[in-house]
Image (cartoon, grey):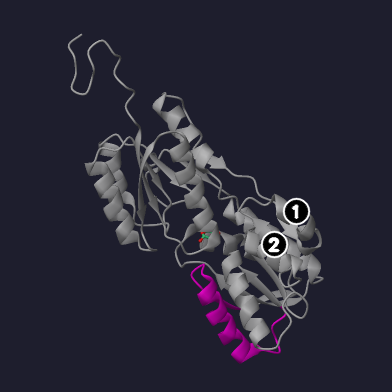
Amino acid sequence: KPQQAGETAGAPAAAKKLVIGFSQVGAESAWRTAETKSIRGEAEKRGIDLKFADAQGKQANQINALSSFIAQKVDAIVLAPVVETGWENVLMQAKEANIPVILVDRGIKVSDESLYTTLIASDFVEEGRMAAEWLAKKMNGKANIYELQGTTGAAPAIDRKKGFEEVLAKNPGMTIVKSQSADFTRAKGKEVMEAFIKSDREKIQAVYAHNDDMALGAIQALEEAGMNPGKDVILISVDGVKGAFEAMVAGKLNATVECNPLMGPTVFDTIAKIRAGEKVPKFIQSKDQLFEQSTAAQVISTREY
Ligand code: AHR
């Protein structure tokens, strides 16, 4: 065969490096940082050229990043979508360019499901159910709950609320008194909790935070107000990051529902299967479990993120 550009005469052509575009939400939480590290680290291990784009929490930045990946003719796109809706146009362009799109950690709502190949994520509705079941048991079916929601329009915020409320509907003594978005960040979690304390100090019995970072911010607000998180106010959140385990060991957080961010290996195994023409499931679910304060000290050293 004729010699190609870049080939040395007599030597086989080097395998072409796989080029993958990864559009990440941002760096709003410890969980997100762990997910980025897992995907970047695994790409590096496998010699993949990963084009990383941090959207700083903005869907418009993600759409621009995807358009640029398509123009560069990447082999696959990995997308952690900030919100559920508004993806049709750009995903249609990816489909037309024959570029498979792998959603990670958050799902989307599209009329045509063929616009993405698969979703690798946790079941957020189930996480909400697990949190509510634990809290109802802990509070003997009666509590004034203050909810810190994740980013408005994001799948984990919508689904963790949905699952939680499903269980509350069967526990009439458990009431969400106030519920507000704190955008999955520690700083906003503290700010919203301060406002809750200002208006409702005497009423607050429990806090349900859609992620650990917001719970950690709320703990700080409660402590600064002279209250006793983990004792006078029971707190449960989602993610299972190291900081949550430290707060549980310190007796300030009561429980966390794990949401595994270490999806790098699954992401690239799945892309390899898609490229080999194998059929992959539409939803590849990560398994999660709930951790309580009572076992936190025992398991903290085994936590990987
Ligand atoms: O999509 C997963 C969620 O996004 C995590 O629970 C939260 O910490 C993150 O920001």
Say if 140 sits above or below 51 in the image. below
Q: Nearer the viewer, residue 250 or 215?
A: 250
Q: Amino acid at mark 1?
A: Val
Whether the residue carrying mark 2 lies under 8 Å from ligand 1 is answered with: no
Answer yes or no: is residue 219 visible: yes
Q: Position of residue 46 (x, y in %)?
A: 45, 33
Q: Amino acid at mark 2?
A: Phe
Q: Secondary structure at mark 2?
A: helix
Residue at image point 51% right, 73% down: 182
Q: Position of residue 228 (x, y in %)?
A: 74, 82
Q: Which residue range is magenta in the image?
A: 178-205
Answer yes or no: is residue 180 visible: no
Is residue 84 located in the magenta-colored stretch of the structure? no
Pointer 1 and pointer 2: residues touching (CB < 8 Å)? yes
Q: Earlier in the sequence, mark 1 or mark 2?
A: 2
Left of 72 or right of it: where is 181? right
Is residue 188 located in the magenta-colored stretch of the structure? yes
Q: What residue sits right under mark 2 in the picture?
A: 245
**Quadrant of residue 60 within the rendered picture:** bottom left
**Quadrant of residue 9 within the rendered picture:** top left
Left of 101 or right of it: where is 186? right
Say if 64 sits above or below 192 in the image. above
Residue at image point 72% right, 64% down: 255
Q: Position of residue 283 (x, y in %)?
A: 52, 41
Q: Position of residue 262 (x, y in %)?
A: 56, 46
- In three-dimensional space, the C-alpha distance between marks 1 and 2, rounded to whole angstroms, equals 8 Å
Q: Residues within 10 Å of mark 2 (few under 14, many from 20)?
A: many
Residue 299 tag number = 1
Q: Nearer the viewer, residue 210 or 245?
A: 245
Quarter of the picture holding the N terminus: top left
Q: Secondary structure at mark 1?
A: helix
